[in-house]
Amino acid sequence: MQKIGGLTFLLSLFSLLVSAQENSLYVAAKTGLNMREKPDPAARVIVKIPYGTGVMIQYAGEESKRVEVEGLLGYWKKVIYNNQAGYIIDAYLLPLPPPVNTVKSMKEYFRQVSTAFGDSLMVSYGSPDHAEDGGSQLVKQLYKNGSEWQAFTGYEYNSMTYFLPHFTMQQAFLLIRLIPEFAQYIDEKDPFVISNKKIKKNGREYEYKVEKEFFGNTPWIERIKIAFEEGAMYNFEMFQMDNQIVIFYGAGV
């Protein structure tokens, strides 16, 4: 069963990568992305490609050099920008434009890159006004690009779940770093989570749990969990499900 699961994961990932190769990818490094003369961090910088700029990866049959930065696994890729050819690290590219400065939540980001598919759906169980008696409310909104958010409210508990299609785990993590809504779990300077650990940050003790598989010497992160306690229990989770990333966080006492 594990082998089948691993094969399914690889096929899903391959589909995402092929799709990315055929479309523009967007620079998600806030300070811009250096385009260098050669695939080497010491090579001369030709130009800095601004945040949000779309680029097309060029494929000339050469083998890509692997690089790791901030826990992110990437490769040097050849691109053309402003009629100049050079190399960039693809770990800082997204399949959709990154958030503009006014975007503070994933809902706002969904509205930036797509449009709602119909009205939101509200499902109530019991009476939300009497949540202590078991009442709860679930609201869902689907978008035309396949993304979706779900908001759940219950007794002394609430959660948000987002479905982000055509992103890899690394790309979703990079996106989350750019959206203030997630700052208490992942802020803009946090490296990609690749191992279990406990750390103190912002006066809180965080516990990180990671599920991963190795394909050769390449680790594939399948699930990331983050938890801390501050009066209530706060939990965050992200994982790949077929060709989409599921992002969840919730808090309750």
Image: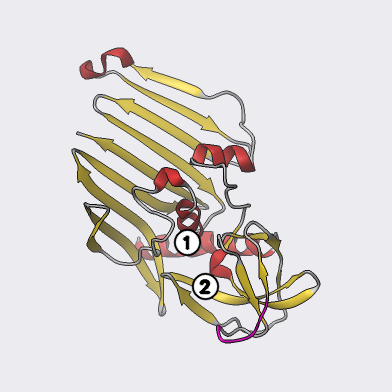
Is the residue marked by circle 2 packed among few (<14), some (14-19), or many (20+) residues within 10 Å? Answer: some
Q: Which of 68 and 99 is in front in this view?
A: 99
In the displayed structure image, the side of residue 211 where residue 79 appears, left or right: right
In the rendered view, would you say 160 is above or below 155? below
Residue 74 — which label?
2
Q: Nearer the viewer, residue 231 or 91?
A: 231
Q: Residue 75 appears in which quarter of the rendering?
A: bottom right
Q: Residue 240: x, y in percent?
A: 44, 54
Mark 2 and mark 1 residues within 8 Å of each other at the beta carbon: yes
Q: What stretch is highlighted in magenta?
A: 41-46
Q: Nearer the viewer, residue 7 or 187?
A: 187
Q: Main secondary structure of the magenta part?
A: loop
Q: Residue 169: x, y in percent?
A: 46, 58
Amino acid identity at mark 2: Gly
Residue 170 — which label?
1
Residue 43 in the magenta stretch? The answer is yes
Amino acid identity at mark 1: Gln
The Cα–Cα distance between marks 2 and 1, rounded to whole angstroms, is 10 Å
Name the residue: 59% across, 52% down. Answer: 98
Q: Residue 235: x, y in percent?
A: 28, 45
Residue 174 visible, this angle: yes
Name the residue: 63% across, 43% down. Answer: 113
